[in-house]
Image: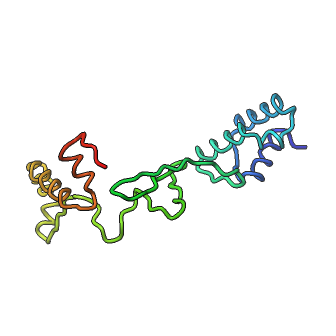
Amino acid sequence: MKGAVEKAKDKIKALYGVDISDKGVLQQIVDMAKSGFGGNLDMAIRSPQIRDLIQLYAMSTGQKTTGMPGAVTPLSLVETGGSLFQSPQYNNGTPLPGLGGLPGLDKIGGGTPSGGGLVIQLDGPATTALLQGQAVQAIVDNPRLVQNATMAATKSNANRRELTSLQLSPGTIVS
């Protein structure tokens, strides 16, 4: 004969694909079933509060859930530069797919440079100097040159007009 805790573990594993090995969590689910659902374990594990507990346990142990009802996520739209974009949405750190064919705001078009970074090309002696820390020291010793190069690259990036105006004049409202 299986006890209530073992039955709860088996039913949760079969229904949601989550293997709960923590006896305290299983006992909490059984106690909630007894107090709130008249001991009906099947009804209890399908209730929102216990589903949330199971999903939280799965997230904290790195397990994937199956059979959970779909979660409603908000959709945020952003209009910038005369174009409409969808803001990125995440669930437990995982990006969710976009809806309706709108481009995502976090996507950068193919072939478009992604920002004003500093590029250092190295030959043999320069690589040796980099590994010895000399190139890094040169960058550290010349912060204005690094900042000027970054600002020049940002100014020349036509796809990021709003970013440029905010860097050059903070507080500017751009439509």
Q: Is residue 77 left or right of residue 32?
A: left
> Could you say which is closer to the camera, residue 18 or residue 50?
50
Question: Going by the picture, which residue comes out furthest to the top?
Answer: 35
Q: Quadrant of residue 39?
A: top right
Q: Is residue 128 left or right of residue 40?
A: left
Residue 132, given in percent of the width and then of the height, sits at 15, 58
Q: Is residue 90 left or right of residue 17?
A: left
Locate the N terminus by quadrant: top right
Residue 92, given in percent of the width and then of the height, sits at 54, 48
> Could you say which is closer to the camera, residue 58 or residue 95?
95
Residue 125, given in percent of the width and then of the height, sits at 11, 68
Taking the spot 77% from the left edge, 42% from the top edge, the residue there is 45
Count of number-bearing discs? 0
Q: Quadrant of residue 55?
A: top right
Q: Is residue 102 left or right of residue 14?
A: left
Taking the spot 15% from the left edge, 68% from the top edge, the residue there is 122
